[in-house]
Each structure stands twice: as C-alpha cells, then as structure tokens.
Amino acid sequence: MAIRTLLFLCCACAVGCNPAPEALTIPDEQMAQIMADLHIAEAATNGTAGFHKDSLSHIYFRQVLDIHRVTQDSYEKNLRILVQDFTHLRKIQERSRDILQDSL
C-alpha cells in the first residue's frame, strides 16, 4: 500500500511540476506567412556565397520581420514554443508550403 501511495505521489508531482506551455504571440497564419517569406528570401541568396550571402540573408531576415511588424525576439520566442509542439509546428509549415505553392 505504501509503495502505491509513494508511486502515486511521484507521478502527481511529475505531472504537477511541469509548467503550462507558453502561449504564442504571433497568430498561426502570420507565422506561416513569415516562414514563406523567409523561404523566398533565402532562395534569393542562392547565387551568392560567403560574406555577401550572410549580409543579404541578415538584411532580408530583418526586412521580412519589419514587413510583418514582428520583432526578432518575438519570432524566436514563438519558434521555441512551436518546437515543443511538433504537430502544431507541422501544421504551420504545411500552411507555409501552401502559401508558397499558391504564389506560383
């Protein structure tokens, strides 16, 4: 009986000690659009290499975030949250792919 009680308490503590997942601050549709735009920006640098590629990538990244009125910190925080929920991330990535295919 004591072992069952101890096991129950350990399980209850393990479940109860996990913090609630943080809420996303960027809506899914906007996140998908940002990902699609970043993919296009990355493709635009395919013909370059080295310092020029790094500089252009950085400029394009900042421009995409500015267009969407999102800070880099906010975008990265949302990515960290999404990495914890693969199903949700996959849904946003699929929407991003659809956005890219619709723009062809």
Image (cartoon, rainbow, N blue to C red):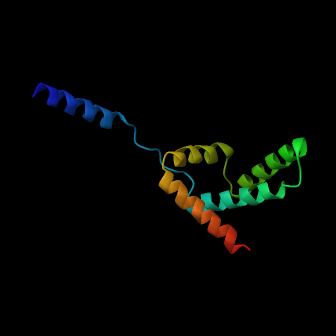
User: Which residue is at 66% across, 57% downward?
Assistant: 35
User: Is the residue 86 above or below the residue 30 in the image?
Assistant: above
> Dividing the picture into quarters, in which one does residue 7 lie?
top left
- Tell me if 8 is positioned left or right of 68 in this view: left
Classify the position of the C terminus by image quarter: bottom right
Q: Where does the image place residue 21, in percent across and percent down from the top left?
A: 44, 44
Residue sitting at x 37%, y 36%: 18
The image quarter in which residue 54 lies: top right
- Camera-nearest residue between 49 and 102: 49
Residue sitting at the far left: 1
Give the image location of residue 91, x and y in percent.
Answer: 53, 61
Spot occupied by residue 69 in the image (x, y as percentages of width and height)? 68, 55
Identify the residue at horizontal 79%, vertical 58% (top origin): 43
State how many labels appear.
Answer: 0
* Nearer to me, 47 or 23: 47
The residue that appears at 88% across and 55% down in the rendered structure is 47
Q: Position of residue 68 (x, y in %)?
A: 69, 58
Vertical position of residue 73 compared to residue 45: above or below: above
Left of 60 or right of it: where is 36?
left
